[in-house]
Amino acid sequence: MHRQPRVDLHCHSRASDGDLTPAAVVERAAGRGVDVLALTDHDTVAGVAEAAAAAAGHAVTLIPGAELSLAHREATLHVLALGVDPNAPGLARLLEQLQDARRLRARHMAERLERLRLAGAWERLQALAGDAVPTRVHVADLLVEADYSRDRRRAFRDYLRPGRPAYAEAPWSSLEDGIAAVRAAGGVAVLAHPGVYGLSARALGRVVDAFAAAGGEALEVVTGPRRDPITARAASHARRRGLLGSAGSDFHRPLERGPELGALAALPPDIPPVWERWLAAG
Ligand code: MN
Ligand code: MN
Ligand code: MN
């Protein structure tokens, strides 16, 4: 018997809204015994080269990835692009569109903050985001810094959710276009964190159907150290549609209580793991 590989196929670096550099994410993962790691920054592969270089110095297989924000009906879905060629032209075009959508939204959020009398919001937001395009997390940090909110959670609740005063829509690309670009780049599309969309069981079933019909191949069945009702629900959707299973922590930063690299429950044994193709190839 081979030892089960320790995988984590969903995490973020400073290339989007994480705190650590891509190299530091890889080092932390290696230190925690992760064998297979996918870096999946929001709508960018900008951190992948640095992460791959760092992985070469550790016993870590680095899967190039990104977390795409895609529109489907009224919802924004997060789809992980795993194992993509980061230089594929179709993917690069899609990522450019998504980054443009993100920039536009960040501008609109900054305008709203200015209207809420938070002066210099756009400049401050860019400073907080560094080289990355500002995300809602950066806006939340700005709200905390300016004493509008006590912490990130309250900033999201009071300002950044749909209907709240600093919220702005982003014109994301469609689910179909996103998945097509992932496949054309040689990658696998994984529907991320099925539990966070606030969908009823039936609505989630319909989303999974649309995702599979568009060429999506896997569901992120395991998202944390424990199996929970969402794990069970996602697993049953994976079985029903014959989809593969994935596992990812959605790590953004070291926290005392919070998602941690590689801290993941096992995939239900009857669900084929999406990562097997990269282990077989290795
Ligand atoms: Mn994030
Ligand atoms: Mn997400
Ligand atoms: Mn994520």
Image: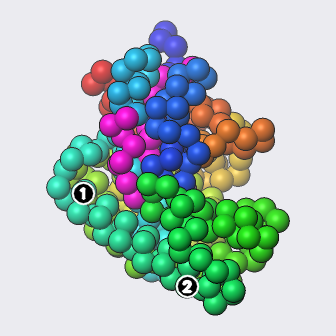
The location of residue 95, given as percent across then percent down, is 31, 61
Q: Residue at x 42, y 72 (%)?
A: 103
- Asked if the residue under mark 1 is in contact with the one under mark 2, i.e. CB atoms within 8 Å, the reply is no
The location of residue 50, given as percent across then percent down, is 37, 35
Looking at the image, tell me whether mark 2 or mark 1 is earlier in sequence order: 1
Residue occupied by mark 1: 92
The answer to whether 80 appears left or right of 150 in the picture is: left
Depth check, front residue: 34 or 223: 34
Question: Furthest-top residue in view?
Answer: 1
Q: Quadrant of the C terminus?
A: top left
Residue bounds of the magenta highlight: 33-50
Rate crowding at label 1 as few (under 14), some (14 to 19) or many (20 or more) other CA atoms within 10 Å.
some
Query: What amino acid type should be assigned to the residue bearing mark 2?
Result: Glu
Depth check, front residue: 41 or 188: 41
Rate crowding at label 2 as few (under 14), some (14 to 19) or many (20 or more) other CA atoms within 10 Å.
some
Q: Residue at x 35, y 48 (%)?
A: 45
Question: Furthest-right residue in view?
Answer: 150
The answer to whether 189 appears left or right of 114 in the picture is: left
Residue 111: image tag:
2
Q: Is residue 168 magenta?
A: no
The location of residue 132, given as percent across then percent down, is 45, 57
The answer to whether 44 appears left or right of 113 in the picture is: left
Viewer can see residue 66: yes
Color scheme of the displayed model:
rainbow
Q: Is mark 1 within 8 Å of ligand 3?
A: no
- Label 1 secondary element: helix
